[in-house]
Image (spheres, rainbow, N blue to C red):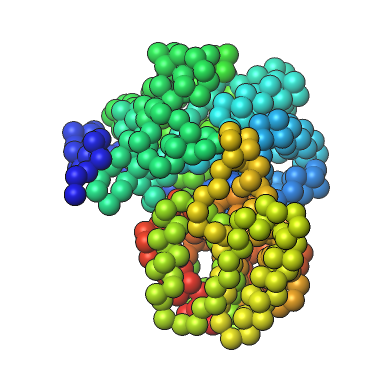
């Protein structure tokens, strides 16, 4: 079998790099004690899968944001779900959140800095979201540096850090790679780059920025912070580079391991302390580093047991259509233990005359099955797209809404022991609408660095652990392994 043209052995891509500069998470944690609180605006829920004991909001009233700011945590997440929205709606949501966050920050006297968290395979509303955030911060005059700074709030720069270490999304010499079974593949040649809504061609991040901004930001104007900068010259040097950003310029940052991101975190703290105002556009691993956390081992059965609901079986909801999810679903079916499976047929979901009855019938059957087995509700595996990106996104939202309604009906009829949601849009909509979670804690992961478990604080899902499982992560056995761990905690 011939390999794709640009797949390279990982050792070849990583050979000749400067030695890693070790930075313990404790050093970052100490350094950021007086730093602004990190507010992570997450365009789907999967950014929480690298962290432990971090607050999560799915709503953004001023009271909700004040609650998050009051928690003893260096960071918190606000689930925006903007990846599922049309551009105008995504822009409006970002504006609403920043305005509410500004009011909450003033009320609590706690400054903040914003990370716009998006997909490590570069899908999402960029540069729309960072443009809107920059405009709104400028309008508010919030200042992202100190709680007493009420002057000009315009960000000096946008720092792009898409790395996701555990999932093998690595940036070397400003080129973004993804790990595959055959080696490292430039992300622009992956299936994710062919996304119907957020597709792209470039793997070199400066070129990607130029492509996504339609030439507004030329590649040669993008500041490149390389592994040599991070590892050889260190935080003070990188802080000077970041401090050179002006007028919203973009910087792209290499990262192959957590130490690289912790060097960056120290540099950001230094640059911001000296007056730099920065916006972050990041993948999941940056959040862990900037929050001063190290990688935590997955939750054990004994840790899961008090979190698990008292029902005998759980619900798995599968909306993601990427090929990896389909393979994971196939392996799940091979696992020992009772498993009932129900399909939401996309053709019926798009037919107004059949939609409601089909959802009701599926949910009723799945709720009944929970008495004797874990239950899967999945969408048709074939991808249904529209004539253009907006139409395709509208179809995705309609299908996701059907899954959400099915979850709501199942939970109302028979509370499951847990809920696993597979797919970014699926997990966001399920949390917000299907289970009506407003506030939660991300308690850790079921697999190393992926598959986050939330403990809902309120609403009908209180007492039901909610597992957020991105569509594009894990090996073929990952979904089966996650379910096996949850079963072991019964």
Residue 334 screen position, x and y as percent: 39, 75
Q: Position of residue 45 (x, y in %)?
A: 59, 51
Residue 481 sits in which quadrant? bottom left
Q: Answer left or right for 206 relative to 107.
A: left
Which quarter of the picture shows residue 84?
top right
Count of labels in the image: 0
User: Which residue lies at the image location 62% right of the left edge and 55% below the top edge?
Assistant: 347
Residue ID at (55%, 36%): 197
Location of residue 184 with respect to 146 vertically, above or below? below
The extreme bottom residue here reads 372
Quarter-wise, where is residue 490 in the image?
bottom right
Residue 217 position in % (x across, y down): 50, 15
User: Which residue occupies 58% across, 70% down?
Assistant: 342
Q: Nearer the viewer, residue 391 or 457?
A: 391
In the rendered image, residue 411, in percent from the top left (x then y), is placed at: 71, 71
Q: Say whether residue 474 is visible.
A: yes
Compared with 358, 165 (above or below) is: above
Side (left or right) of 320 relative to 233:
right
In this rendering, position of residue 311 left or right of residue 354? left
Q: Is residue 77 left or right of residue 219?
A: right
Is residue 27 in view?
Answer: no
Q: Residue at x 61, y 63 (%)?
A: 344
């Amino acid at each position: 079998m011939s390999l794709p043209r640009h797949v390279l052995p990982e050792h070849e891509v990583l050979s000749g790099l400067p030695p890693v500069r070790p930075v313990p998470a404790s050093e970052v944690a100490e350094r950021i004690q007086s730093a602004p609180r990190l507010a992570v605006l997450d365009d789907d829920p999967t950014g929480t899968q690298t962290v432990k004991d971090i607050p999560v909001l799915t709503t953004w009233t001023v009271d909700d944001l004040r609650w998050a700011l009051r928690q003893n945590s260096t960071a918190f997440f606000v689930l925006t779900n903007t990846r599922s929205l049309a551009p105008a709606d995504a822009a409006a949501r970002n504006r609403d959140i920043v305005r509410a966050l500004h009011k909450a920050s003033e009320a609590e006297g706690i400054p903040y800095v914003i990370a716009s968290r998006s997909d490590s395979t570069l899908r999402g509303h960029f540069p729309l979201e960072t443009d809107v955030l920059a405009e709104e911060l400028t309008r508010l005059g919030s200042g992202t540096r100190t709680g007493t700074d009420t002057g000009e709030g315009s960000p000096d720069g946008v720092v792009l850090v898409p790395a996701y270490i555990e999932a093998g999304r690595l940036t070397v010499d400003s080129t973004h790679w993804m790990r595959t079974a055959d080696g490292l593949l430039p992300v622009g040649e992956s299936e994710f780059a062919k996304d119907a809504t957020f597709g792209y061609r470039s793997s070199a991040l400066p070129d990607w920025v130029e492509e996504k901004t339609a030439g507004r930001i030329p590649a040669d104007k993008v500041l490149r912070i390389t592994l040599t900068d991070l590892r050889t010259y260190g935080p003070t040097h990188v802080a000077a580079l970041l401090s050179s950003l002006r007028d919203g310029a973009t910087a792209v940052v290499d990262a192959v391991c957590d130490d690289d991101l912790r060097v960056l975190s120290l540099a950001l703290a230094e640059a911001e302390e000296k007056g730099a105002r920065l916006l972050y556009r990041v993948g999941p691993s940056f959040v862990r580093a900037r929050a001063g956390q190290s990688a935590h081992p997955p939750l054990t059965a004994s840790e899961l047991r008090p979190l698990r609901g008292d029902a005998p079986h759980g619900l798995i909801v599968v909306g993601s259509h990427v090929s990896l999810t389909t393979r994971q679903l196939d392996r799940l079916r091979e696992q020992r233990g009772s498993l009932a499976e129900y399909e939401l047929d996309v053709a019926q979901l798009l037919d107004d005359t059949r939609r409601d009855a089909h959802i009701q019938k599926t949910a009723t059957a799945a709720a009944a099955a929970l008495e004797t087995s874990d239950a899967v509700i999945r969408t048709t595996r074939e991808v249904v797209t529209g004539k253009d990106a907006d139409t395709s996104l509208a179809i995705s939202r309609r299908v996701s809404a059907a899954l959400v309604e099915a979850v709501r009906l199942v939970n109302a009829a028979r509370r499951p022991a847990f809920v696993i949601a597979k797919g970014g849009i699926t997990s966001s909509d399920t949390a917000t609408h299907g289970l009506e979670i407003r506030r939660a804690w991300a308690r850790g992961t079921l697999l190393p660095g992926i598959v986050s478990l939330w403990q809902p604080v309120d609403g009908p899902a209180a007492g039901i652990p909610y597992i957020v499982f991105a569509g594009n992560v894990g090996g073929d056995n990952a979904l089966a392994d996650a379910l096996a761990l949850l079963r072991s905690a019964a």
